[in-house]
Image (cartoon, rainbow, N blue to C red):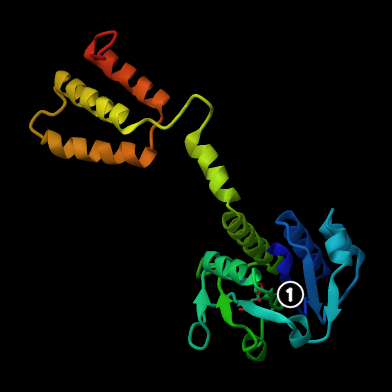
Amino acid sequence: MLENIRIVLVNTSHPGNIGAAARAMKNMGLSKLVLVDPVDHPTFEAYSRAAGADDVLGDAQVVKTLAEAVSGCIWVMGTSARERTVRWPMMMPRQCAEASIEQAQQGEVAIVFGRERTGLTNEELEQCHALVNIPTNPDYSSLNVAAAVQVLCYELRLAALAAQGSLRDINDNVTARHQGDKPATSDQVEGMYRHLYQMLEDVKFFGTSNPDIIMRRLKGLFNRAHVTVREVNILRGIFSAAQGRKSARK
Ligand code: SAH
């Protein structure tokens, strides 16, 4: 999917930004770079900033106009440092990446970045289906163009991984944890709750407060954590210790 997404840099002034953008792309698994009328290219400086991404930089296509750069694309996203919403739908980076990955399954996609000082012209913005704004400090909203490329390429990578299901696997590894540390079953969790309740009563924690409300809140906390068998055992060990006995398991 990422191979169908091209990064377009319009009229970039600083060669270092072109190199840094190439590096940002390669780190995130993107390789198609298109330069519209770059001020100075190719340069030693760009290659030095590209570090190991000289292949992306060397393969960069140089064209005269944005129209040439996005030819053949079924989906074109423009980037803007301003939250201009009057004429174009404005997306958040995550939404932009998800939409772009979806479109990239059917055809070519372009993400377009503007000039360092002035961004994209209205005429260029009109060639985009939608705009994306990286939410920044409103008092200092404009990112370096290569930094903006980095943020969007990262979001594209996350969206691509999610679409391939690998992100789900990564998440499963985090939540399913290590071997032998399986998520606790509902009866194990219920047993832990009963033990927790008994312990809180034993230590006279409830006092005048309503035990039901406190238990409801604590259950909410444990549900969010999606506790494992091992964690349930540790908790029950703690409850027993608070109750002053070695084991409270009945
Ligand atoms: N004064 C210009 C700033 C251009 S910054 C303007 O207001 O448009 C150079 C390029 O970096 C922008 O054209 C855009 O491609 C990208 N960029 C910088 N900050 C951004 C942000 N917050 N969201 C999205 N893109 C951004």
Q: How many marks?
A: 1
Say few, some or many: other residues with alpha carbon within 10 Å of mark 1 (under 14 / 14 to 19 / 20 or more).
many
Q: Is residue 14 above or below residue 190?
A: below
From the image, which quarter does the N terminus lie in?
bottom right
Q: Which residue is mark 1?
A: 8
Q: Quadrant of residue 110?
A: bottom right
- Is the residue indicated by label 1 positioned so its CB lies within 8 Å of ligand 1? no
Direction bottom: furthest residue:
123
Farthest residue toward the left? 208
Image point 59% across, 68% down: which residue? 102
Picture coordinates of residue 159, whole percent (x, y): 58, 60
Q: Quadrant of the C terminus?
A: top left
Residue 125: which quarter of the image?
Answer: bottom right
Q: Nearer the viewer, residue 204 or 211?
A: 211
Q: Is residue 200 above or below residue 28?
A: above
Can you say whether 152 is above or below 243 in the image? Answer: below
Q: Nearer the viewer, residue 250 or 8?
A: 250
Task: Describe residue 28's horizontal placement relative to residue 160 as left or right.
Answer: right
Secondary structure found at label 1: strand
Depicted 119 relative to depicted 123: above or below: above
Kind of residue indicated by mark 1: Val
Q: Quadrant of ligand 1?
A: bottom right
Front-lying residue, 22 or 163: 163
Q: Position of residue 224 (x, y in %)?
A: 35, 42
Percent coordinates x, y for residue 161 in the rendering: 61, 54
Say whether residue 13 is visible: no
**Does residue 157 appear in this view?**
yes
Q: Does residue 144 appear to the left or right of 214 in the view shown?
A: right
Give the residue drawn at x 48%, y 87%.
Answer: 86
Residue shown at 15% from the left, 18% from the top: 202
Q: Position of residue 209 (x, y in %)?
A: 10, 35
Q: Residue furthest top?
A: 246
